[in-house]
Image: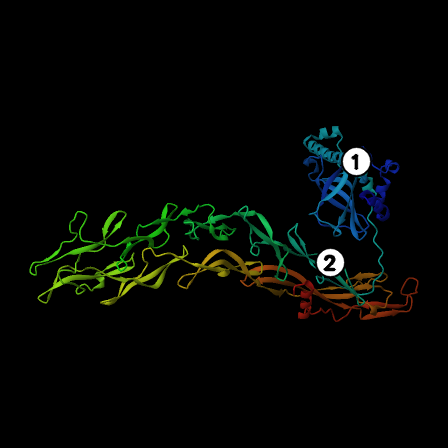
Amino acid sequence: MNKQTLWCLLLSSCLVSPALAQMQETSNPSSETNSEPGIEEMVRKVNIVTRAKTRTAVSQNEPMAIDLGLVDVPGAPPKLTEGVTAKAYARYVNYEDSLIAQLVLTGVEKDGRSEPLDSNDFVAQFNMDSPELDPASPVTIEGNQETLIAALQRLNDVEEEDDKEEKETETAEADTGASNSVGSNASKNADAAGYSSPAALDVEEDTSSPTVRVTTEGCNIRVDLAQLVAVQQSRVETTENGAVSSAPCEDGGDRYPLDRSYSVCGDTIDMETRQATAQYLLYYTDGGGNRQEVTDCLKDEDKVFDITEKASACSVYLDYNEMMAVPQASLAYDNASNNEVQVRSCEPSEEVEAVPLVSVTDGCSIRHDFAAGLSLQTGRHIYELNGTTWQADACSDNGTEYPHETVYKNAAGQEVCAPIINQAAGTVTRQSRKQIVVNGVEQFITECKPDSTNIAIQSTIDGCDNPSLWNHDLAAGASYGRERFYYQLDGVPQYVTECQDSEIAYPHQVETTGWQNHDDQLFSYRLTTVYIEGTPKGRYNIKTSEVLPGEPQMAYVYSGEAPATNGEHFYEGCTRFDARDLVESYDRPDGSMHKVVIGEADPLSLGNKCYNEFTWGAVSHRKYENPRSVGHNTGGPCGTFENYSHVYDANYHCTFSDSVGTRTTVREDGEVIATAAKTCTTYNRYSPVKAKYYTGGSDADGSFQGYIRVKFPSSGWSYPSHTNGVKSGCLGNWGWLQ
């Protein structure tokens, strides 16, 4: 069924008011012969946007007069609609379990002047959620554009004419024949002139005493995402003669704003675009201080963060198979709180290329193995990154060997060492040195050593046994004892040399005495004590708790990540959250743990931290006294009195006790989150205590027999107590005890 057909059907079956009946009588006669509008009429129809000036209840079936404001009239300049009130009639009808609003426009008015409109040319019909017009919801009326603009122009012309006449002299006004009736055209509006208010409905006498209450029980909270508000619905419950009836749930007065929460939604990560987007959800805090989430997490396209490489917390990976030093970097971004959040741990950098590992001997020495008759070259690896040269490892044997050679003479045939001549003994003792050839260059590795032939020359450590004076070769990992040579002369040793390095090597022993931690680079250096044993003086410490040259870096071992509270907290409404950091844990070589904050972790929700405080104002009293006029019915909030009824069967008077209850929602930190106030009312009902019985003659024809009330109680009025039970009942009915 199309809109036009439904409108006509409902008009014919439901509209019974004089105004709408008149509208039908004054409609264009041509429509009776041609029900379908012509092309010209359809062209003139436009959508006119109006709005109720206040929230206005609409009656069922019976049309009622309402005022509308003009929001948009197509083709009309703003000057024509400024200050204009649209006069209309509206009602609603039930059709197939739906509320259908029907509205016709009958005229426009400004500053006491009016212009009539043909209601047949201005019609609206639409569905309603509730029987009222909300100023927040515009109403679109399909109407004749030409007719409406002409009426608005006439109102404007009259206004301009009035302004012009005020500036002219009284003589000029007389010449023009100005009249006070210029701005009033109400008599031209047949629809408005013929309308009369509907007569009051006849209601059967109700002698019962129903109980009516408004409750939120069984009603939900409706979430309006468009207006960002949650509305507590309520219903009217009526109890009469033991039977309980309930009206449908409708929007009540308790409304809770919807707020955004970013704390419980993590950011979305897009590794392809290298962007992170913040997320939020909508929630509200209900009357009980409870947080109610109404949406899933939603992207906030206004909070997008670039993901970039961070190399500061990553080490360089040393690939000895490929002989490359590979820079590593993590991926991170700064979130809405300006805190860094890591989205990927250390991996080969995409921005900094790998550099080659270079084998060098700089800083390393040649290690002499006299027992094997060899000297061994030691070397290390370095790499250059960002203009800085870095050591990759410590010195160690690189495979290059130099055999030892005992030399007495050089290439020129000269003795490399001066012979020891003992003129007294008449003997000559030759001396030699050991040498190696490195890159074609001869190098001596020992001092001159007397030959043991010819003369009984002996060596001794006497006077050379102090290890502090020895040669300690840390790079080669050995210390060399010292000795000196002598021969016996008359039983007295004659020293032919000073103390010098011997061929007795003491291998270096090392023990770890601690660690030097570098948390910023996630590695440690070993603190080492280097010592030798078996010396004439026993154990001797060469280095004590030091970082040795070439000591390799010992990387921290990653052990995982987890959230940890940081001592801060915040509130969202009544809900408390403890802030947490996302922490990476690393095991140091010394067994201790190093923690690195890499971002924010989801806060820990501690739930509702609000409580309600209830206070009550002073109790006030009021009363209702039914009139005692004879010969007519009277009604009040406590019942209806009729002179021809038995006076003891009904209550005619009542007293009331009122008190305002205030609910204050307080958070644990003392902050007041919300306040609300409502009035709690209880009452007593009374009936007359004295009456007179008439057998006849009390009325005009002398036919009345029965009781007539004579007076009210002489003891005065009493008011109901406002007990704690009454207050608790009101709190429950208001839904404040949830």
Task: Say what amino acid the circle numbered 1 marks.
Answer: Met
Kindly tell me whether residue 241 is visible in this rendering: yes
Image coordinates of residue 166 in percent, x first then y, are 69, 33
Image coordinates of residue 159 in percent, x first then y, are 71, 35
Residue at screen point 36% across, 54% down:
393
Q: Which secondary structure lies at badge 2? A: loop
Out of 10 and 382, give the one closest to the viewer.
382
For the N terminus, which image quadrant?
A: top right
Residue at screen point 55% across, 56% down:
263
Label located before the other in sequence (1 or 2): 1
Q: Which secondary structure lies at badge 1? A: helix
Question: Which residue lies most toward the left here?
Answer: 424
Numbered-mark total = 2
Where residue 573 sits, quadrant-wise, is bottom right
Vertical placement of residue 705 versus 265, above or below = below
Question: Which residue lies most toward the front here?
Answer: 454
Local crowd at mark 1 within 10 Å, few (<14), some, or many (≥20)? few
Mark 1, residue position: 42
Mark 2, residue position: 249
Task: Say what amino acid the circle numbered 2 marks.
Answer: Cys
> Is 258 on the left or on the right of 429, as rendered?
right
Where residue 369 sits, quadrant-wise, is bottom left
